[in-house]
């Protein structure tokens, strides 16, 4: 039979029709899957590219913090600094670096030669209490046992069977040290989240018990080190003003990015940006990473689409451009106006006339010299500073008595407040 006639006859058979439709459907599904994979691949590349911001800002504080941990084993370390200065990120980098760091603990002589046995310098445990809802000792036990790089099942059973979470945890830490020769580094972040939680006896606060436990394992034992962060209020009230913590603790300040780091970050995303534009950004935003990242991503999002290859191509084109002075000045002026309005609202709501004059004096000094040194003899002056600190407008360093804006943009807002009133 003629091949053409055979095909015409086969096309009329229902089974052939179904097979043909199924083949077409499968081909369409395959094309959609390929397109989807292509889009997801480009999105993954874009996401990886945006995450390179962290790699472009290797914080020197991480190395300094590691040296401090190793050099002073008799004190716990409290990390503090202005809001959004990168404390959480530095502790995450510290956890990652400590986890990878190795040291030689023993040299074994074999027939072939010397064999170096390596072990971790520290066994890190990282707990961010923002990740947990702690309303009881059981919740605290859950947080301690489910930290980053958690204990294995056998260790968890040993801690639970001890009957007391603090005793069981300390015994397990001691066991790790005796077995591996490795100290445990306990990194505790946002410890103020435990404030207000009462123990079952209703006589003691959970935060006090936990802090005493941290002092115990961090300063009175040889097998653990402790690094802590918290909110600024908690730092002042529970650590700096408490003589016990002040004597047993070491305070480590984290500040915003340096000019060099800020410049490298901008040039990574906008290679052709002129130096005058970078200096303008530094003058208004400084090294506050969230404000800087907001500016960077705002420029990128103007052209970038969400889907597929077009978004990827737009980013490739964007990389060849630089930030223009006019666009940056327009954006920065809007940010200063926004912060100025925020400060003005807080001032009118929280300060009286006399306190306002004190704030203007502080603002004038910060505008001219970049810093204001507080006089503790003037109680009202300290009260005004504390009010502004609670609103995240000012930052007060109790170790040096320096008062600055919590970020550079707030210093510009205070400057505008001083000029307008």
Image (tube, rainbow, N blue to C red):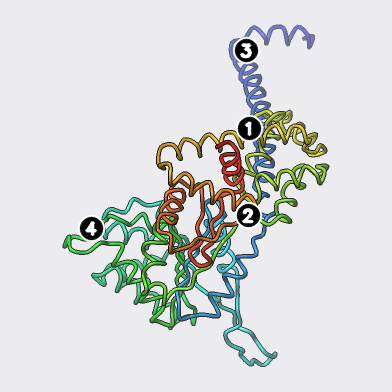
User: Secondary structure beneath disc 1?
Assistant: helix
Dot 2 crowding, Cα within 10 Å, few <14, some 14–19, many 20+: some
Residue linked to disc 2: 370
Marks 4 and 3, how far apart at CA: 73 Å
Dot 1 crowding, Cα within 10 Å, few <14, some 14–19, many 20+: few
Residue linked to disc 3: 17
In terms of depth relative to the viewer, which is nearer, 93 or 363?
363
Q: Are circles 1 and 4 on residues that touch, CB within 8 Å? A: no
User: Secondary structure beneath disc 4?
Assistant: loop
Q: Are circles 2 and 1 on residues that touch, CB within 8 Å? A: no
Q: Does residue 316 appear left or right of residue 125 in this picture?
A: right
Residue at image location 64% in from the left, 47% down from the top: 51
Q: Tell which circle, 4 or 3, labels the residue nearer the N-terminal end.
A: 3
Residue linked to disc 4: 198
Q: Tell which circle, 2 or 1, labels the residue nearer the N-terminal end.
A: 1
Dot 3 crowding, Cα within 10 Å, few <14, some 14–19, many 20+: few
Nearer the viewer's eye, disc 3 or disc 2?
A: 2
């Amino acid at each position: 039979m003629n091949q053409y006639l055979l095909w015409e006859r086969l096309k009329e058979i229902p089974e052939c029709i179904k097979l043909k439709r199924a083949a077409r459907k499968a081909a369409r599904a395959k094309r959609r899957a390929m397109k989807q994979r292509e889009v997801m691949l480009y999105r993954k590349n874009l996401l990886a590219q945006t995450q390179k911001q962290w790699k472009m800002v290797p914080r020197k504080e991480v190395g300094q913090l590691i040296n401090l941990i190793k050099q002073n084993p008799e004190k716990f370390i409290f990390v503090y600094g202005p809001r959004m200065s990168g404390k959480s990120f530095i502790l995450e980098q510290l956890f990652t670096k400590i986890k990878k760091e190795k040291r030689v603990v023993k040299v074994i002589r074999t027939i072939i030669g010397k064999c170096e046995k390596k072990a971790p310098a520290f066994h890190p445990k990282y707990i961010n209490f923002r990740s947990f809802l702690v309303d009881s000792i059981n919740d605290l036990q859950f947080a301690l046992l489910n930290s980053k790089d958690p204990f294995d099942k056998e260790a968890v059973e040993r801690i639970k069977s001890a009957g007391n979470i603090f005793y069981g945890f300390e015994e397990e830490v001691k066991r790790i040290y005796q077995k591996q020769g490795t100290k445990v580094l306990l990194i505790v972040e946002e410890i103020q989240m435990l404030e207000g939680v009462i123990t079952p006896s209703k006589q003691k606060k959970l935060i006090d018990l936990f802090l005493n436990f941290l002092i115990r394992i961090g300063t009175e034992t040889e097998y653990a080190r402790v690094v802590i962060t918290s909110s600024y209020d908690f730092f002042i009230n529970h650590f700096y003003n408490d003589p016990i913590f002040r004597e047993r603790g070491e305070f480590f300040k984290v500040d915003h990015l340096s000019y060099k780091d800020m410049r490298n970050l901008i040039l990574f995303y906008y290679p052709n940006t002129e130096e005058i534009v970078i200096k303008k950004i530094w003058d208004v935003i400084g090294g506050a990473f969230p404000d800087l990242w907001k500016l960077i991503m705002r420029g990128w999002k103007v052209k970038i689409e969400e889907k597929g290859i077009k978004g990827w191509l737009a980013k490739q084109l964007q990389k060849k451009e630089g930030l223009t002075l006019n666009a940056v000045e327009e954006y920065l002026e809007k940010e200063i106006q926004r912060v100025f309005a925020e400060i003005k609202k807080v001032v009118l709501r929280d300060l009286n006339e006399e306190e306002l004059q004190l704030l203007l004096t502080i603002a004038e000094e910060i505008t001219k010299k970049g810093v204001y040194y507080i006089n503790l003899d003037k109680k009202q002056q300290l009260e005004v500073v504390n009010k502004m600190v609670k609103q995240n407008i000012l930052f007060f360093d109790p170790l040096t008595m320096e008062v600055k804006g919590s970020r550079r943009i707030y210093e510009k807002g205070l400057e505008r407040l001083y000029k307008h009133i």
